[in-house]
């Protein structure tokens, strides 16, 4: 049994640990929090990116300030700050929700840059071509820019999810029992032999990024078959 | 060392890339102060031969001697020399490339002084004095502080020649030094090479400039499919090539 | 609600300044380890020797595939199983540095590979040893592409030192947490360390643009920067 005061976790013990319910549920927490945080970040990134690109000075300034603040300070600090101020603000959010929101707000700054680069990256000639067809600005944005920008965003956003799997480890600080917290708990209970627990955690983090890497490849291959060639 | 012994002796050198033999039993002697021009169609192995002498490629069999010392290997048993010995041997051969390969982050002067300072451990003053003389000789004294991308192709190649000369090599290898140049600037580089030849620098030159070959080459070697088919005194080679393939080749390029 | 006097008092508190110093010194030592090891690993990665290259590959995979926090904890906790207890600062800076080295080695490797092969050959025929070729010819030319990501890595490093609080290294964030235990005023206290972090990262941003301009020698064009930089070493 994991965490039991046994002398040392042998090979069989480590294998048992690998599929123990505690570990598996911690892995699951890591996976879904990462996906949730990344999805929220992608959504929040859109208005930020548009604000950065807009010609309105105040909007631009707000976006700039947001990025400066969130990228100039540690993610872990932001996380602990949210966790610390929630009770003061009288919000009764579950810890994990606070954690996901913090991860997402931090990531939104990054996503806004990716989205902005994708929008800028759409060839200006496409815009002109659409103009000559008599499309309105909104139509051009919705029908021409967005689909192409989405395609440009796909690879970097995929990499961000990979990063997010690792970023969720910081949730350990606010005692969300994800994979790293679980590892620490194990190591605390069995301080003489921490290595197997770290090895198991490393294995799962590794597996996540490898598996996601394969999915990413598929997605991109499919996009390419649909005629979006990487230029 | 007696003066009649060849400076460079190439004996039955072969080189394969995979299953493709690029050099087949190439043998050649080069005398001190001799200028040898190598001609041959594209892909015949001219560059590979020069690169073998400069030890940029490792030969598979045969041997190359410079002043009686075997290059790259300890003995006929093909035990490789340690890296620092190979580095030391490379100092004795200079090479000028088709694409100049000047160090992009250094000025013309720094390009010339780098190796004397770092390899020969000359002081900065010594190295710069020699470098300025060499720049003078190639007519680029005033370009000492220019970076390669501020120089024309012909100027870059002249600096590259000065860079090679700064190490005082025993033999200077030229691999198509003018092929990447505009027709107008070819002459300025050839003039430098002619000057070197008159000063008694031993050179092997791969080039398609037959005018240069006629003017200064002592001998001409003709290569095809990794073999040297003919070596003859320059005049004899151009007037009446012995090998039917060299005759055909000359017919094409003249 | 907002207490200015508390803010100013905490901002200029001796311990706060000391924590800021601790943050900076961990970041600098971590960066030195990261850059040195990154260059060594990158040089091996760019070489043609197969086995050393595989070792570097494995190193990079391990350090990039797992969270930095897990690595920091492992560096601190696992050696104790073998009777070695690394001091907090050593374990922390080593983990930060070795993690960053994995990211930088890729930067160095591709930087070195982007240098034209002719440059290396020209140096070789002049009799330079491989170390001399690396030091005087290829690295300086790769510097132009290596400097911006290395600068970003230091920026990230300033922030990731916050993870060292987990192993009770007293940097800024841990300092804030400790203060929070006695004075529960999160807004003021976090504002204080935010000021410190922003000062550090913003100041470094200015230094960085100076550095990048300096390394753009030889009249070569600046590296285009349309895309956001790839993420480096954060978390
Ligand atoms: N690194 C390499 N790998 C594989 N094959 C090579 C390599 N370098 C040269 N070769 C082959 O070796 C042969 C000889 O090449 P080499 O460059 O010596 O010819 P060359 O006579 O200098 O030709 P050119 O006049 O075009 O410069 C060619 O068929 C070439 O394709
Ligand atoms: Mg050639």
Image: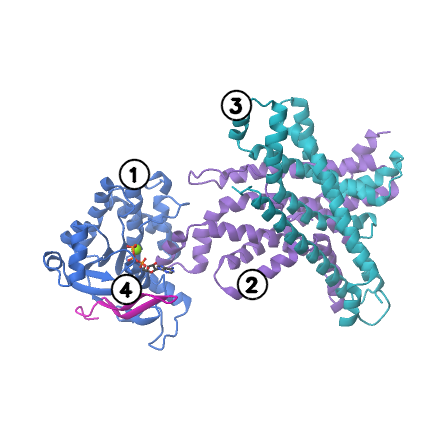
Chain colours: A cyan, B blue, C purple
Magenta-highlighted residues: B1-28
Badges 2 and 1, same chain: no
Residue B207 seen in the current view? yes
Total marks in image:
4
Q: Within 8 Å: ligand 1 and the Cβ of disc 4?
A: yes
Q: Chain of mark 3?
A: A
- For ligand 2, give the image quadrant: bottom left
Helix, strand or loop for disc 1: helix
Q: Nearer the viewer, residue C228 or A157?
A: A157
**Mark 4 touching mark 1, by CB under 8 A?**
no
Mark toward the viewer: 3 or 4: 3
Are the residues under marks 3 and 1 on the same chain? no
Q: Kindly identify which residue carries mark 4.
A: B226
- Residue pointed to by mark 2: C54
Crowd class of label 1 (few under 14; some 14 to 19; many from 20; radius 10 Å): few
The disc placed on residue A222 is none
Q: Is residue B21 left or right of residue C202?
A: left
Can residue C85 be seen from the camera position used here? Answer: no
Q: How far is the residue under mark 2 from the one under mark 1?
A: 49 Å
Front position in the image: A203 or A196: A203
- Camera-side mark, 2 or 3: 3
């Amino acid at each position: 049994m994991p965490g039991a005061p046994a002398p040392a976790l042998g090979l069989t013990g480590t294998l048992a640990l690998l599929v123990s319910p505690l570990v598996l549920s911690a892995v699951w927490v890591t996976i879904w929090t990462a996906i949730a945080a990344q999805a929220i970040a992608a959504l929040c990134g859109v208005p930020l990116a548009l604000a950065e690109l807009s010609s309105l000075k105040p909007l631009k300034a707000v976006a700039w300030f947001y990025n400066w603040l969130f990228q100039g300070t540690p993610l872990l600090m932001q996380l602990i700050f949210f966790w610390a101020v929630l009770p003061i603000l009288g919000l009764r959010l579950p810890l994990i929700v606070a954690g996901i929101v913090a991860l997402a707000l931090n990531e939104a700054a990054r996503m806004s840059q990716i989205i902005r680069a994708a929008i800028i990256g759409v060839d200006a000639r496409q815009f002109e071509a659409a103009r000559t067809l008599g499309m309105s600005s909104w139509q051009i944005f919705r029908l021409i820019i967005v689909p192409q920008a989405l395609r440009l965003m796909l690879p970097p956003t995929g990499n961000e999810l990979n990063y997010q799997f690792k970023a969720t480890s910081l949730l350990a600080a606010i005692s969300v029992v994800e994979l790293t917290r679980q590892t620490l708990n194990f190591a605390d209970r069995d301080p003489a032999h921490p290595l197997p627990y770290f090895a198991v955690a490393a294995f799962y983090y590794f597996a996540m990024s490898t598996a996601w890497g394969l999915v990413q490849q598929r997605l991109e291959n499919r996009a390419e078959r649909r005629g979006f060639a990487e230029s | 060392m007696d003066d009649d012994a060849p400076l460079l002796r190439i004996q039955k050198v072969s080189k394969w890339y995979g299953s493709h033999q690029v050099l087949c039993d190439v043998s050649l002697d080069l005398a001190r102060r001799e200028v040898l021009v190598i001609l041959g169609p594209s892909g015949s192995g001219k560059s590979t031969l020069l690169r073998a002498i400069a030890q940029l490629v490792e030969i598979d069999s045969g041997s190359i001697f410079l002043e009686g010392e075997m290059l790259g290997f300890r003995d006929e048993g093909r035990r490789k020399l340690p890296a620092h010995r190979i580095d030391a041997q490379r100092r004795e051969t200079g090479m000028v490339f088709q694409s100049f390969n000047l160090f992009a982050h250094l000025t013309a002067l720094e390009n010339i002084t780098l190796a004397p300072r770092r390899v020969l451990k000359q002081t900065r003053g010594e190295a710069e004095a020699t470098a300025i003389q060499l720049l003078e000789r190639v007519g680029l004294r005033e370009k000492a502080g220019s970076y390669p991308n501020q120089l024309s192709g012909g100027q870059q190649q002249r600096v590259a020649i000065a860079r090679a000369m700064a190490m005082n090599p025993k033999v200077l290898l030229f691999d198509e030094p003018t092929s990447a140049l505009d027709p107008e600037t070819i002459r300025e580089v050839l003039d430098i090479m002619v000057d070197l030849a008159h000063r008694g620098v031993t050179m092997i030159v791969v080039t398609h400039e037959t005018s240069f070959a006629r003017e200064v080459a002592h001998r001409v070697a003709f290569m095809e499919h990794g073999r040297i088919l003919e070596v003859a005194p320059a005049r004899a080679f151009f007037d009446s090539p012995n090998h039917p393939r060299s005759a055909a080749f000359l017919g094409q390029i003249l | 609600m907002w207490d200015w006097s508390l803010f100013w008092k905490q901002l200029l508190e001796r311990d706060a300044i000391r924590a800021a110093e601790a943050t900076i010194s961990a970041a600098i030592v971590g960066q030195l380890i990261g850059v040195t090891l990154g260059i060594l690993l990158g040089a091996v990665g760019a070489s043609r020797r197969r086995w050393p290259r595989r070792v570097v590959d494995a190193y990079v995979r391990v350090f990039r595939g797992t969270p930095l926090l897990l690595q920091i904890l492992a560096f601190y906790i696992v050696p104790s199983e073998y009777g070695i207890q690394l001091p907090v600062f050593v374990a922390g800076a080593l983990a930060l540095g070795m993690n960053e080295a994995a990211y930088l080695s890729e930067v160095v490797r591709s930087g070195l590979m982007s240098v034209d092969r002719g440059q290396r050959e020209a140096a070789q025929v002049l009799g330079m040893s491989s170390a001399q070729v690396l030091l005087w010819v290829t690295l300086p030319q790769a510097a132009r592409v290596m400097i911006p990501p290395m600068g970003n890595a230091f920026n990230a490093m300033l922030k990731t030192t916050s993870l060292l609080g987990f192993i009770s290294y007293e940097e800024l964030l841990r300092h804030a947490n400790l203060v929070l235990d006695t004075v529960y005023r999160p807004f003021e206290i976090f504002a204080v360390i935010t000021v410190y972090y922003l000062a550090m990262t913003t100041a470094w941003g200015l230094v960085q643009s100076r550095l990048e301009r300096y390394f753009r020698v030889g009249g070569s064009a600046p590296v285009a920067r349309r895309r956001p930089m790839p993420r480096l070493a954060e978390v």
